[in-house]
Amino acid sequence: MQTYRTAQVAKMIGIHPNTVRLYEELGLVPRARRLANGYRVFTEQHIAQFRLARLAFRVEVLQNGLRKKIVRTVKTAAAGDFDAAIRLTDDYIAQVRQERQNAEEAIRIVRLLLAGEPAESGALQNRQAVSRALGISVDTLRNWEMNGLLTVKRRENGFRVYTGEDIRRLKIIRSLRCANYSLEAILRLLHELSSDPHTDIHAALNTPRVDDDIIAVCDKLLLSLQAAEQNARAMRNLLREMKSQYS
């Protein structure tokens, strides 16, 4: 059986030897056998697991628990449960695709908003229905409202009702939060758009780079999500190979 030392693994994978040790400490690869002198001995299965981890972390996608999900997938594979890791990868791919749809919809909505087109009409919805429809927790909706991002009308009985305009606004907020904009930046943007549909979006957001605006941000988010999906599909193929060889 072919074996490798830490330095050899680092050179093969293209990482620092300290990263090899860190991955082992974090449970991202199986524990290596130790020689009497304390040197680690890695196998072909370790090499495959390191390649899996590198695929997983090639693109940083943080929103809605995706980062935690991909870490869990790698650790599950390191524990030798390849079937569960494949299922987790499938779930991850499905969620990434949903996030891509959300970003694409945000771009469409912003273009409609800037063109001055009215929101789509529809039945009024309560907070629970909006939470389910948009994949946003009730606590998140409550937080956004408390921070002034949205003012929701109430019925006579005190229950909130969300209009088509509210839903459109929430979709924009959701995508901007996924792109790591602060609540303060989003609030400033929405206030300025409300008073002037032709406002300078990148100035309103006060982004680190002056050429960024909502559409550009969502486009970049889309590129990251597309890369994450490609990596996840490669991970799934590798997991199937690992299952056939090391189960």
Image (tube, rainbow, N blue to C red):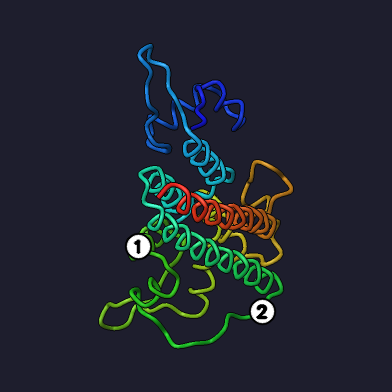
Establish if 180 lies above or below 47.
below
Residue at left 39%, top 36%? 30
Residue 232: x and y, percent? Answer: 55, 55
In this rendered view, identify the residue nearer to me: 115 or 157.
115
Establish if 213 lies above or below 153.
above
Q: Please, what secondary structure does the residue beneath circle 2 have?
A: loop
Q: Residues within 10 Å of mark 1 (few under 14, many from 20)?
A: few
Left or right: 216 as drawn, with respect to 51: right
The residue carrying mark 2 is: 117
The residue carrying mark 1 is: 142
Kind of residue sitting beneath label 2: Glu
Q: Residues within 10 Å of mark 2 (few under 14, many from 20)?
A: few
CB within 8 Å, label 1 to label 2: no
Left or right: 156 as drawn, with respect to 242: left
Residue 133: x and y, percent? Answer: 43, 75
Q: Quadrant of residue 151?
A: bottom left
Kind of residue sitting beneath label 1: Arg
Q: Please, what secondary structure does the residue beneath circle 1 have?
A: helix
Residue at left 38%, top 79%? 161
Residue at left 52%, top 61%? 93
Residue at left 50%, top 22%? 5
Residue 24: x and y, percent? Answer: 41, 31
Residue 123: x and y, percent? Answer: 44, 88
Q: Earlier in the sequence, mark 1 or mark 2?
A: 2
Left or right: 106 as drawn, with respect to 4: right
Cα distance between the residues tagged 1 and 2: 27 Å
